[in-house]
Image (cartoon, rainbow, N blue to C red):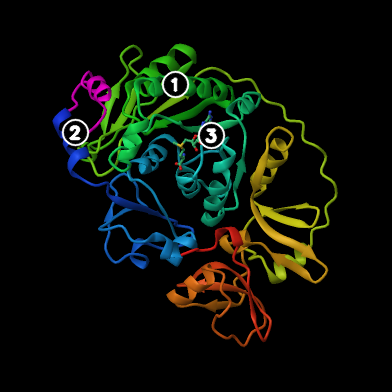
Amino acid sequence: MLPLPLIEKLGTLPGLDLPAFEGVHANSVAPTSIRINPLKVDGIGNLFAQSKAVPWCDTGFYLPERPFFAHDPNWHGGAYYVQEASSMALHAVWQQVVPAAREPLRVLDLCAAPGGKSTHLLSLLRADDVLVSNEVISARVNILLENITRWGHHNSMVTQNDPADFSALEGLFDLVLVDAPCSGSGLFRREPQAMQEWSPEVVLQCSRRQQRILSDIWPALKEHGWLVYTTCSFSPEENEEMLDWMCSQFACEPVKLDLPESWHIQQVEAARSGAFGYRFYPHLLQGEGFFLSIMRKKDAAGHWRPRVPAMNKMQIPVDALRNDWIADNHDLAYYRHKDTLYAMAPNALDLFRQLQPALHIRKAGVCLGEWQRNGLQPDHALAMSTLVHPSMPRLVLSREEALQYLRRETQLPASDRKGWQLASFEGLSLGWLKHLGNRINNYYPMEWRLRS
Ligand code: SAM
C-alpha cells in the first residue's frame, strides 16, 4: 500500500488518475530495460534476440524478461547498461536542447553514482566534449568508477567532491545535470520495501538538500548554459515547487520541450513561475516515476580563472605506445604520473589540468598502465577502451570460458602466442591475460571478479 500522506498530496495534482496510479503499483511489475553502448556494439540484435524500443531513446530497449545480467559477459565488457526506461529521456532532452553545430561542451553530472546518466551522456557527447562525473559519497564512488571505465570513453573524468566545492568554478560548465538525491517514491513499484523509509519529513529534508545542492552549483553554470534537474520522486515539493524556488532565486529561463503525445509523458507547469516540468507516471508509460525539467541561465556568470600549474616535462614513450598498444585513429593527449601513463582527448587533458588544484579527481581519461623497464604493464581501463591497437592478439573465448575468465580462473584455452593478449567474447574485450607458455596469468581486476 502506498503511503497515505503521499496519496493525499498527489490527489492535489491536476489530471492525475489516482485509482490507475495506485492500481499499477498494486498489480504490475517494473519493466526491464537496457541501454546499449554504441561505442562497442552495433545494435541490440547482437545482444538479445527479443526486445522492444524505448520510444524516447534510440539506444534504449525493453527486454521481455529479466536475464541474470551478472552471467552475461557482454554486460561485463560494457556492451550495455541496465537502466530504468524513464531515466533514458535524457536522450530526448539532449536532442532538443543542444544544437548540432556548436563549440565543444563541458558537461557536469553532479550526482553521478552509479553512473546511469553519466554513461548515457558519454554516448551523447562528441569526442571533443568533456564530461565530469562527480559523486560526493565515498562508498558510491567505486561503482561509478567501474561503470565509467567499462563504458570505455576517453573524454571523461570522475571527481569526488561536495557540490559546494564547485561554487568557485564560476561559469565553467555548459550543461549541468543535477539528478538529485530524493525521497525515491518514483521507484516504489520496483522497490516496495523503500516505502517503509518514506515520510513527509523525509520529503522536506530532501527538498532542503536539493535547494542547497542547486545553490552551490548554480555559479558553475555558464551564461546561457543548461541546468537539467531530475528526481525519481512524485512529490511536488521536490519537483514543481523546486522549479518555483529556482525561479525565485536564480536568473533563469524555463525550457519547454516538444514531446510527442504518444509517449504519454505529462507536461506540467509550476504554480507560481509557470516553469515547465515533465512527469513520468508508471500507469501512463512503460517506466518508473521520474521528473525532469530544464532551466537556461540568463545572467552573465563570473569567469573562473584557473591557476594551471606548470606541467613538468614528462617522458612519454609515445612511439612505443603507438607501435604496440594504442590505435592511431584517435586524437590523444598523454599524461604521466610517476610511472603510470594516461591517455585522453586533448580537451579532457586541458580541463583535467585546470581542475587538478581545485577538485579531488579520482579518474581522468584512460589509464594505459605502468611503464616498466620491460615495457607497458597494461591497465584494465585500456582493455575496456577503444584505444587498443587493432593488431593486439586476442584469445577468443566461448560464453563458459568467458565466465571462467571473469571469475579470474586460469584454466583457459591454449594459445600458440605468448605474451599479453585480450580476453575476447563475441568481439568484445573483457580484460587482459598474459600467456607464459606453460600457464596463463589472468589480469581481470580482483575487485571486479565474478563471485557466483
Ligand atoms: N545519476 C545517477 C544515475 O543515473 O546512475 C543516480 C544518482 S542518485 C539519484 C543521487 C546521487 O546523489 C547518489 O549517488 C547520492 O550518493 C548522491 N548524493 C547524496 N547526497 C548528496 C549531496 N548532499 N550532494 C550531492 N550528491 C549527493
Mark 2 is on which residue type?
Glu
| Magenta-highlighted residues | 1-17
Mark 3 is on which residue type?
Leu
Instruction: Report the residue marked by disc 2.
Output: 22
* Residue at x 62%, y 88% (from the top left corner): 416
Q: Is residue 398 above or below residue 214?
A: below
First in sequence, mark 1 or 2: give its number.
2
Any part of residue 129 in sight: no
* Residue at x 40%, y 19% (from the top left corner): 204
How many discs mark residues in the rendered view?
3
Label 2 element class: helix
Q: Is residue 68 above or below residue 412?
A: above
115 or 354: nearer the viewer? 115
- Mark 3 lies within 8 Å of ligand 1 (Cβ measured): yes
Could you tell me if the residues under marks 2 and 3 are in contact, i.e. CB atoms within 8 Å? no
Crowding at mark 1 (Cα within 10 Å: few <14, some 14-19, many 20+): some
**Left or right of 365 in this view: 223:** left
Instruction: Report the residue marked by disc 1.
Output: 205
Q: Position of residue 158 (x, y in %)?
A: 60, 43
